[in-house]
Amino acid sequence: MATPRFSPSGSHVQSWVLPHLIAFLERQEIDASPIRSLPGLSDLTDPDARVPEASAESAWKLAAQLTGDGAIGLHVAAGLPRGALDLVEYALRASASLGAGLERLAHYGHVLSDRVAARMEANDGGLLFIMRDIGNTVLHPARAEFGMAIVLKLARESTGIDIVPLQVCFAHRTPKDASEHESFFRAPVRFDAGSNSMLLKAADASRPMPGRDEALSAIIRRRLDKLLDERTRHLGGTLSAQVRYMMVEHLGEKTLTPESTAKGLAVSPRTLSRRLAEEGTSFRHLLDDVRRDFACALLQDRTSNIGDIAFFLQYSEPAAFTRAFRRWTGRTPGEYRLG
C-alpha cells in the first residue's frame, strides 16, 4: 500500500450514486431540488467527480425523508443499471470466480468511497463480506443497506445464479418494517448486530463467472491500482478515519501496533498519538472498535473456531477475547452466536 499523506480536508466520496438516488425520487414525481442544492451537488454529470461526504450523507437522509421509504437503500440498489460501478464492477465481472470477484470489490471499494472500508474472508465454511464504516459520524442506515444490496445484486448478476446468503447483518437498529429486507435478501437478516456483513455459502464463492476474462481483468486491475494508489496517497478526512481504514485492511494479516501504523501513515508515533488525542480518541480505542466489528461479523460463521477468531483479532488467548467481547456486548461469543 502506498504511504498516505494526511490531509486535514474533509472526506469526499465519488458522486456516481447520487444521480441514481435523484432519479429514484423523480420517477416517483418527488421534487429532488433539496438534494441538488446541497453543497457540491450542483453538477453531477461527471460520474468521477467527488463530492463532500457530508453532502452525500445529507442526500440519503433527505431522500429517505422525502420518500418515506424505509428500504430506500435496497430499492435504489435494485434499480441500478449494469456498469453503474464502472471499472470496479467490471473488475468483479471479469474475475474467474465469485470469491475472486468479491475480493476485488472489497479491495477496490475505496476508489468509490472514502467512507467505507471492506474486507472479504473465506474458509471452508463460507465467504464473509464485511463493510466497515470508518467515518466519525453515524452512517445513515440506507447507505449501509445500499452497499450490502449492491454486493448481492452483483453476485447474482455476474454468476447468473439466484444466490441466497446464509445470513445478513446490519449494525443499525431494526426498521419498523423489515419485510422488504427479507424479500430482497431471502435470508435471515439480523439488525443491531454489531457489524455490516454478509455470509455466503462456500459453494457460491467458488462459482465460475460467465464473463471471466483474465486478460481484460488484468487491464482493469492495472487502471484500478493506479486510481487506488492515488486515492491512498491523498487520503482526506480525519486521521482516525485513516487509521480505521488501515486497520480494516490489515487486521488478521499483520500485527497492528501504534509504531507500524504511524510508519504506514508517514508520521511519528508521538504525532499519531497526539493527533488522535486531538480527535478525542486513541489507537487502542480505534483497534478495540474495529476488533468488535470484525468479531461480530466473524461469529456469523458457526464453523469458525472461537480460538481462531481470537487469534485473527490479535488476542493472546481465547479467554482475553471472551473478556473483551463480554465488555463490548454483555455476552460471551458463544451466547452471541445463539442470537
Image (cartoon, helix red, strand yellow):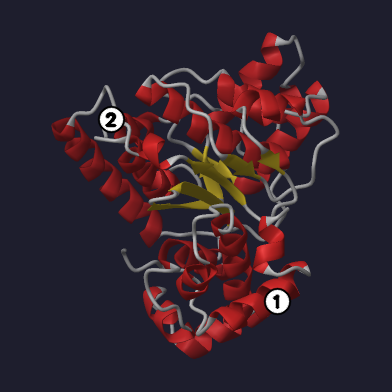
Q: Amino acid at mark 2?
A: Pro
Residue plotted at (55% across, 54% down): 302
Q: Secondary structure at mark 2?
A: loop
Residue plotted at (50% across, 31% down): 152
| Viewer can see residue 321 | yes
Q: Secondary structure at mark 1?
A: loop
Residue 14 position, x and y percent, is: 50, 39
Q: Is residue 101 above or below residue 290?
A: above
Quarter of the image where one finds residue 215: top left
| Viewer can see residue 16 | no
Residue plotted at (49% across, 35% down): 151
Quarter of the image where one finds residue 29: top right
Q: To which residue does mark 2 refer?
A: 208
Count the marks: 2
Residue 157 versus residue 269: which sits nearer the camera? 157
Select label 2 or label 1 by which is in front. Answer: 2
Q: CA distance from mark 2 to mark 1?
A: 47 Å
Residue plotted at (74% across, 76% down): 327
Q: Is residue 173 above or below residue 32?
A: below
Q: Going by the picture, which residue comes out furthest to the left?
A: 215
